[in-house]
Image (cartoon, rainbow, N blue to C red):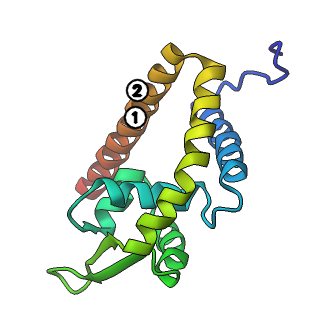
Amino acid sequence: MRADGLPDLVCACASLRRAARAMTRLYDRALGGTGVGAAQFTLLQVLARNEQPLTQRALAEILAMDSTTLTRTLAPLARQDFVQSRPGADRRERLWTLRPAGKRQLQRALPRWERVQQRVRSRIGVQHWEALIEETTRVATAARMRALDGLRAEKDQ
């Protein structure tokens, strides 16, 4: 048992899931009262950073989300007119963009998000913060590539 009271978990998946749940809870509380939670804020942020519409598949890839979860997260944002979809080149494809109301919502939530980001950064230190961002991206990329390799191998059999 560590001094902070949390035992080490020997499984990478369990450790990352525990960290993700704790961070999501922290960010959801910080964003409370803004009308969006951490997952919805992230979607607004990703769409804001891309000038071109993003396909649902591209959004799912960026966020490493399955299509069903992404659809459930986008639905309330669409109902509130924060995001909009339109058909893509293929009628099964959906292109998503941030609406003006979504930009305003993102701007309203941004100060709370920035405060919680700063608190976490201060707590773990800038060097660990930068390593965290880099390593979680590396882990997600490796897991995604491994999953794709596994799917290809299954398909070849």
| Nearer to me, 23 or 90 | 23
| Left or right for 151, reference 34 | left
Please report the residue visible at 34 percent of the width from the left and 58 percent of the height from the top.
48
Q: Tell me if residue 67 can be seen.
A: no
Residue type (three-letter) at the residue carrying disc 1: Thr
Distance (Cα) linking label 2 and label 1: 5 Å
Q: Tell me if residue 78 can be seen.
A: yes
**Residue identifier under label 2:** 134
> Could you tell me residue 141's position as x and y percent?
35, 38
- Determine whether the residue tagged by mark 2 lies in a helix, strand or loop: helix
Rendered-image quadrant of the C terminus:
bottom left
Tag 2 and tag 1, C-beta contact below 8 Å: yes
Q: Is residue 64 above or below residue 136?
A: below
Q: Is residue 124 above or below residue 108?
A: above
> Could you tell me residue 40's position as x and y percent?
53, 62
> Could you tell me residue 97's position as x and y percent?
31, 71
Please report the residue visible at 65 percent of the width from the left and 47 percent of the height from the top.
27
Please report the residue visible at 48 percent of the width from the left and 72 percent of the height from the top.
74
User: Neighbour class for label 1 at 10 Å: few (<14), some, many (≥20)?
Assistant: few
Rendered-image quadrant of the N terminus:
top right
| Left or right for 4, reference 26 | right
| Left or right for 10, reference 40 | right
- Determine whether the residue tagged by mark 1 lies in a helix, strand or loop: helix
**Residue identifier under label 1:** 137
Residue type (three-letter) at the residue carrying disc 2: Glu
